[in-house]
Amino acid sequence: MSKAHLELTDVSMSFDTPDGAFVALDRINLKIRKGEFVSLIGHSGCGKSTVLNIVAGLLQASRGGCVLDGQEVNSPGPERAVVFQNHALMPWLTVYENVDLAVSQVFRKTMNRREKRDWILHNLALVNMEHAANKRPGEISGGMAQRVGIARALAMKPSVLLMDEPFGALDALTRAHLQDALMRIQQDLNSTVIMITHDVDEAVLLSDRIVMMTNGPAATVGEELQIDLPRPRNRVTLADNDTYVHLRQAVLSFLYEKQTFPGKGPAAASAAPSQDADTATTDSSTSSAVTKASQGSARTSTADTGQESARAEQQRAIA
Ligand SMILES: Nc1ncnc2c1ncn2[C@@H]1O[C@H](COP(=O)(O)OP(=O)(O)OP(=O)(O)O)[C@@H](O)[C@H]1O
Ligand SMILES: [Mg+2]
């Protein structure tokens, strides 16, 4: 691999809880090259969002650290756009204004009013949300809000795009449309992407590499899988491709034979609420979209607490 553009070195994360320290991550090491698309996959509660939040600069690792282009990451920055697991829109701003907030921050000096407006509308059109530009988050569905979050992140033309289950709450058609759009945009911008997903097909279709995490507590990188399928990729033709089928099998085997929930000690108990949702996501993109949408609220409350504080920080950072 060429020189790392983004590097996590011995990243460990311990949270203070009323029951004492909870070690979520233990010595995560990852080197990511510029323009690489990396998916993080692992069972619910293993620490995927925690890794992403550390790269976003929203959480500080307890040990080790993250370096982007030679600079240590210790705060959020506009070159690292985040699409949160649950969308993070400002409820008092319209859809248009939510995207504008990010665009104005990044392109204040390089785009005039008219260019900004066109760019915002272009990105809203990309996620098919142009029609709702003047609505507030409370007036649109969860899936629509998620799409606005994606538009906001893409509109920043980020050097690094951090996506936490970005398509989880979307119907199968919208999901496929946005996955294709993301592949095109990522190729055009040569953005580095780290995407968390529970969907094995999505991971294989989009990624250059899949990083599979072990179950927590003290989760770490279990296996890495290089996805050497030629681009551009077509979901229909890939379905019959032997390499694709083999890669998909390898991820499933890691998740459901090597890192299965039952009998795995404390991690099994803490992660159990989302097990069904996660299992269903691997069956097909369609069932995953439906299952995640309906069971999204079944996530562990501690994980949600972490998400909430990270989101609040990101909002402050953007504001
Ligand atoms: N602020 C916090 N305080 C205490 N524990 C936390 C905090 N944030 C996360 N955790 C714990 O760290 C572990 C990893 O959480 P994280 O949200 O990173 O998991 P995840 O892999 O993203 O899960 P999911 O797939 O359900 O989103 C979980 O056991 C969670 O309960
Ligand atoms: Mg998460």
Image (tube, rainbow, N blue to C red):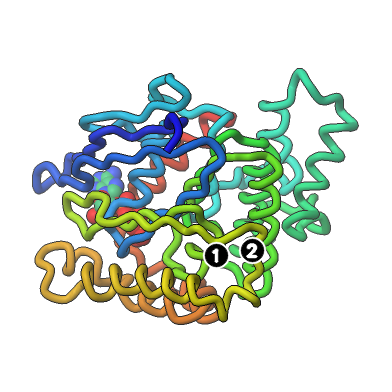
Residue at figure coordinates x 38%, y 21% from the top left: 72
Up the image or down, 209 lies above or below 43; here it is: above
Of 60 and 235, which appears nearest the observer? 235
- Residue in the picture at 33% in, 58% down: 212
Check disc 2 and report the residue beneath it: 233
Residue 26 is marked as: none
Instruction: Determine whether 198 is above or below 92 in the image.
Output: below
Quadrant of res 258: bottom left
Residue occupied by mark 1: 205
Q: Is residue 283 left or right of residue 190?
A: left
Element type at marker 1? helix
Please report the residue visible at 29 percent of the width from the left and 56 percent of the height from the top.
223
Amino acid beneath label 2: Arg
Q: Which corner quadrant holds the C terminus? A: top right
Apparent side of residue 126 relative to residue 80 in the rendered image (left or right): right
- Residue 38: image location, x then y, percent: 46, 50
Q: Label 2's element? A: loop
Task: State the image quarter where residue 229 is shown.
Answer: bottom right
